[in-house]
Amino acid sequence: MADQEKQFQTGFNHGYILSAHEPELAKAILKATHDSKTMSEYSHGFSAGHDIRVLEHIIPEKTEMTKPAKEMESLNTPEKKFTKGFNAGYLIAKHEPELAAKIVKLPNEKSHYFKGIVSGKQEYEMEKMRSRLKSVTKDNAPAKGKNINKGRGK
């Protein structure tokens, strides 16, 4: 599966699940997404997932549930909601950092899913910082076998 398809699918799942559990947050994210100058594959997927969830809610079918619908049913505890939000926040921060920045500014601090999104975004940013720090430390480290005290007076 191509990277763009993965981003669309991830956005679709997040849009679908979030629309079911946090409809106000989903609407705010959609607004932030549509206010952006360009929409990414993730944003298109998020919008499509939201739309499908709304349609399924309006016109319930008697068919087998989709994968996002099954995931939605399993989010019955605060811990599961936080974990799903964390994973979503991490992926959004990785693929759509501008959208992640807009999402965490939304006033919804009471939701476990939203708290997970914020934590996931923070985790991604910390990992990115650790990676940068490792590369800087690695670049500035003296070469092995070199005497760093050579030439210094006693």
Image (cartoon, rainbow, N blue to C red):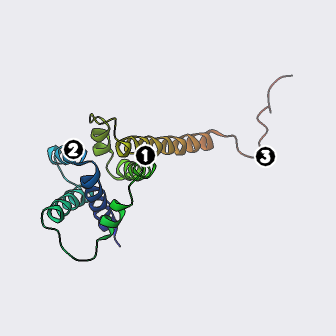
Q: Which residue is mark 1?
A: 120
In the image, farthest residue toward the right = 154
Circle 2 or circle 1, nearest the eye: 2
Measure the alpha-carbon separation of dots 3 and 2.
60 Å
3 and 1 marks in contact (CB < 8 Å): no
Q: Amino acid type of disc 3?
A: Gly
Measure the alpha-carbon separation of dots 3 and 1.
41 Å
Q: Please tell me which residue lies in front, 40 or 149.
A: 40
Residue 139 image position (x, y, % from top left): 60, 43
In the image, farthest residue toward the top = 154
Q: Amino acid type of disc 2?
A: Glu
Residue 56 image position (x, y, % from top left): 18, 65
Q: Which residue is mark 3?
A: 145
Check disc 3 and report its element: helix, strand or loop.
loop
Circle 3 or circle 2, nearest the eye: 2
Circle 3 or circle 1, nearest the eye: 1
- Give whichever of discs 3 and 2 has the lower sequence position: 2
Q: Quadrant of the N terminus?
A: bottom left
Q: Please tell me which residue lies in front, 135 or 91.
A: 91
Q: Residue at x 33, y 69 (%)?
A: 67
Measure the alpha-carbon separation of dots 2 and 1.
20 Å
Q: Amino acid type of disc 1?
A: Gly
Q: Which mark is residue 89?
A: none
Above or below, 21 against 140 in this view is below
Residue 111 image position (x, y, % from top left): 34, 41
Number of marks: 3
For label 3, the crowd category at 10 Å Cα-Cα, with few meaning under 14, some 14 to 19 and many 20 or more, is few
Q: Which residue is mark 2?
A: 24
For label 2, the crowd category at 10 Å Cα-Cα, with few meaning under 14, some 14 to 19 and many 20 or more, is few
